Every structure is written in structure tokens, then in C-alpha cells.
Image: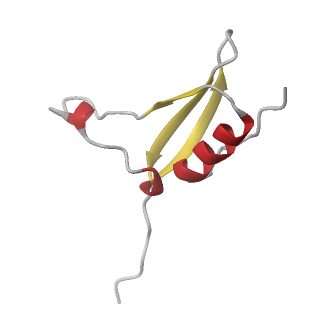
Amino acid sequence: MHIPDVTAYRLDEARRLLDQQGLDYYIKKPIPAGAPGATSVPCAPQNYRVVRQVLTEDGITGLLVAPEVHAYNQS
């Protein structure tokens, strides 16, 4: 079975592609050390990008995601 490479995709797009293929996956969001209550912060898929994709021994795709940051020029 072909597993699409969704690295750098927005999370909502990555999930859509994996769902269309009928693939099992999990999402892991890094939490800064010492951030109280960070585990309860919702992960809005349109605000995150896949930064790493791994395949577990049992065929489940893991997605490491990070917040998308937009740089802009303050002139």
C-alpha cells in the first residue's frame, strides 16, 4: 500500500489525504517543557504543519506537527 508523503502539508490537508487512503495515523504535537496545561490546548488543523512523518512497525503513520508561523515585515 502506498503511503503518501505529507511532510510540510497543513494538518487538515494531510489528514484528508490519509483518510482518503483509509490509513491509520496519530498526531503528536510537541509541548514546550514546563508549559502547564499545554496538553489540553486544541490543535486547530488549519494552523499546524506536518514537520515529520514516521511509520510504526504495525503500519500506523505518525505525524509530528508544529504551529504554522507567518513572518511579516514591520515597516
**For the point 41% across and 35% down, which residue is it?**
29
Give the position of the N terminus as an image quadrant.
Answer: top right
Observer-nearest of 63 and 51 = 63
Residue 20: % across, % down: 70, 42
| Figure check: 49 above or below 2 | below
**For the point 52% across and 34% down, which residue is it?**
64
Residue 35: % across, % down: 19, 34
Is 1 on the left-hand or right-hand side of 50? right
| Figure check: 14 above or below 27 | below
| Figure check: 1 above or below 15 | above
Q: How many numbered markers are drawn?
A: 0
Residue 65: % across, % down: 49, 40
Is 48 on the left-hand or right-hand side of 4? left
Residue placed furthest toward the bottom: 75
Where residue 41 sits, quadrant-wise, is top left
Residue placed furthest toward the left: 36
Residue 38: % across, % down: 23, 35
Give the position of the C terminus as an image quadrant.
Answer: bottom left
Residue placed furthest toward the top: 57
Colour scheme employed for the rendering of this structure: secondary structure
**For the point 53% across and 51% down, which residue is it?**
12
**For the point 62% across and 47% down, which residue is it?**
16
